[in-house]
Amino acid sequence: MKRRRKPLILRMKRWIPLLAGGSALQFINLSGCDEEVRNTFLTGVQESLTGLLTSVVNAFFLSLTGGTTTTTTTTTTKAITEITSWLA
């Protein structure tokens, strides 16, 4: 009888804290870097994450509207842009 495999999310539960901790340690190690290099790196990471988040949210709302651009989508996009700039 074959053993049933766990879903991917249950198998990844063990690795998520490890990955988060490793990422946090990498940012702590940046404290020894030159301040200008650290700021440039962190600015790049921030911009890429903001762009990724904006793209995912825009794709979600486009899928809800069926791919058509309406006033609601434009208003939602403006709101999301303002929220992401506020979070940054």
Image: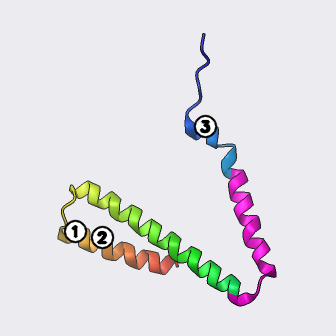
Q: Please report whichever mark, 3 or 1, sits nearer to the chain's N-terminal start.
A: 3
Percent x, y of residue 31: 78, 79
Percent x, y of residue 87: 51, 76
Q: Quadrant of residue 4?
A: top right
Residue 10 tag number: 3
Residue 13 tag number: none
Residue 20 part of the magenta segment: yes
Give the labeled residue for mark 2. Answer: 76
**Can you tell which of label 3 and label 2 is closer to the viewer?**
3
Q: Quadrant of residue 75?
A: bottom left
Kind of residue sitting beneath label 1: Thr
Element at badge 2? helix
Q: Quadrant of the N terminus?
A: top right
Residue 18 part of the magenta segment: yes
Kind of residue sitting beneath label 3: Leu
Q: Please report whichever mark, 3 or 2, sits nearer to the chain's N-terminal start.
A: 3
Residues marked 3 and 2 touching at CB (< 8 Å): no
Kind of residue sitting beneath label 2: Thr
Check disc 1: other Cα within 10 Å, few if <14, some if 14-19, many if 20+. Answer: few
In this orientation, which residue lies closer to the viewer: 24 or 38?
A: 38
Q: Residue at x 22, y 68 (%)?
A: 72
Residues marked 2 and 1 touching at CB (< 8 Å): yes
Please state the extent of the stretch shown in magenta in the rendering. 17-36
Q: Residue at x 63, y 37 (%)?
A: 11
Q: Residue at x 60, y 37 (%)?
A: 10
Element at badge 3? helix
Residue 72 tag number: 1
Its colouring scheme is rainbow
Q: Residue at x 70, y 63 (%)?
A: 23
Percent x, y of residue 48: 51, 72
